[in-house]
Image (cartoon, grey):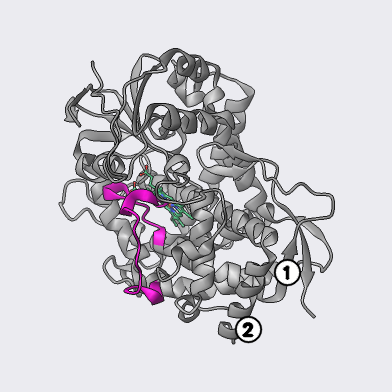
Amino acid sequence: MSIPSNPHMTSPLEPRILAGPPGPSFVRRALTGQIFRASTIELLRANAALYGDLVHFRAAGRHVFQLNHPALVQEMLVRDAPHHHRGIVMQRARFVLGDGLLTSEEPLHLRQRRLTQPAFHRDRIAAYGSIIGDYALQMTRTWQSGDTRDVHHDMLLLALRIVSKCLFNADVQSEARNISAAVDAFMGFLPLAFLPFSAQITRLPLPLMRRIHRGEAELDALIYSLIRQRRASDPGQHAVGNPDQGDLLSMLVAAVDTEGQTGSMSDRQVRDECLTLLLAGHETTANGLSFALWLAALHPEWQQSLRDEARQVLTGEAATAADYTRLPLTWQHFAETLRLYPPVWVTARTAAEPYAFRGLSIQKGSLLIAPQIVIHHDQRWWPDPERYDPDRFAGQAPSQRGQENSTRPRFAWFPFGAGTRQCIGEGFAWMEGVLALATILREWRVSLPVDHSAALEIQPRITLRPKAGVHLQLHRYS
Ligand code: HEM
């Protein structure tokens, strides 16, 4: 296989494709599991700096293509989607997640996506606004002024409670500790997903696997009991297509396959979807919120503007959906957070069949990766890329659309992915991120504890997370 070489980059919008496969070092990193340690990010960035917009290497017997240009990302995620399956990590994640939205392939994926979509309709998300405002307020009421807390821990609990209440009408406060432990154990498996025989590893009685299966059993017990309760209640009042009645769980339980092939959804399928949404819907948002609070602590002048905005807009006790579009600075701050610290830091696909891409023959089984963590920091689209500057997103908040004057290509920023597998929870995540931040920063000032490093250690796992929490000092405004 040959990589076309184009060392003459003429326009920043024209992908620069250079040859140069640094294979062996990647193989070693993959085989030793290093690829999921912090150095992976450096590896991907070095690849982009050294080899250009399309980088190729071989890893564990596979061809890997790293795409570092927005135009290539668009082709991968949108145009070429029919040629792809999920990336390896998601394929391996099936042993816990089953066939939920994150892991299923077509045609099951499309059918399930259509069934799930009404729970993410704009009207439904508006209804979630008050739950978000209410739970965020409840959380801050447990805080003491002057305390230093791991706010990441708080954000995980908050996001878990919000997603469970909104989608399943369940308050999981008492189960939250077990759920978090289960998610942690599950994240621990992901570095192993790249190892040869990883499917077999999942069946070995290793301590890690035992922890994962214990967590899975606890999650199953919770979800199956919710399903049982819901099946026992009157299914007629939870009809699919009537988004004003019932929550997502009711919709799934009442769903009948409209193509008439399989009848109603099995408990196992409902469980797979619920577990997927519980996991996908809280880790990412919690990480985003934690990074956003960290950046607010590092930038007191912006934090003050966010407080002023929140005080002006949040006039009721708790925030509601109506406040969302009136918080453009908070929106910008969250958008810049997702640029600097994208909770989904790399998006991967596996070629399901051979096809041609930019003059290359992509073989079946090749891995394609689009790293948000590289493209969001590319100085061609983001001058002085490491500098925090929410004004990069000025004029782009939902209330300001139409004023935007962006010179960036669309895919220079893709925290929620794109195409058929674009994040189904994007609208939900924005509402949650903006309303929770405004609720917190209206009443509380966050700062770095004295003698605390201003550098945040991050851990690239299946999501990008703070490695040792986010410890901040909290001060209540009098
Ligand atoms: C800041 C928060 C979030 C970020 C950054 C994020 C990011 C993403 C990204 C990048 C993808 C696409 C992955 C790919 O193409 O391989 C995705 C998919 C997904 N996300 Fe999110 N997400 C967030 C919040 C949420 C929430 C709140 C929910 C649900 C309540 C959710 C549920 C899902 C699901 C189910 C998928 C799979 C969609 C499919 O394949 O059809 N996410 N997310």
Q: Residue at x 69, y 47 (%)?
A: 469
Q: Which mark is residue 75?
A: none
Q: In whole angstroms, how far apart are the C-alphas of marks 2 and 1?
A: 18 Å
Image position of 431 with respect to 342: above or below: below
Q: Is residue 400 magenta?
A: yes
Residue 448 at x, y = what percent? 76, 56
As drawn, the label of residue 317 is 2
Q: 32 above or below 323?
A: above
Residue labelled with disc 1: 445
Q: Is residue 149 left or right of residue 354?
A: right
Quadrant location, the C terminus: bottom right
Q: Which type of secondary structure does the marked residue at label 2 adopt? A: loop
Q: Name the residue located 52 percent from the left edge and 24 percent from the top edge.
A: 192
Give x and y (percent) for residue 459.
60, 38
Is label 2 or label 1 in front?
1
Q: Residue at x 48, y 52 (%)?
A: 339
> As shown in the figure, which amino acid type bears the numbered disc 1?
Arg
- Residue 20 lies left or right of residue 315; in this view the side is left
Residue 9: image quadrant is top left
Magenta residues? 398-426
The secondary structure that most of the magenta stretch takes on is loop
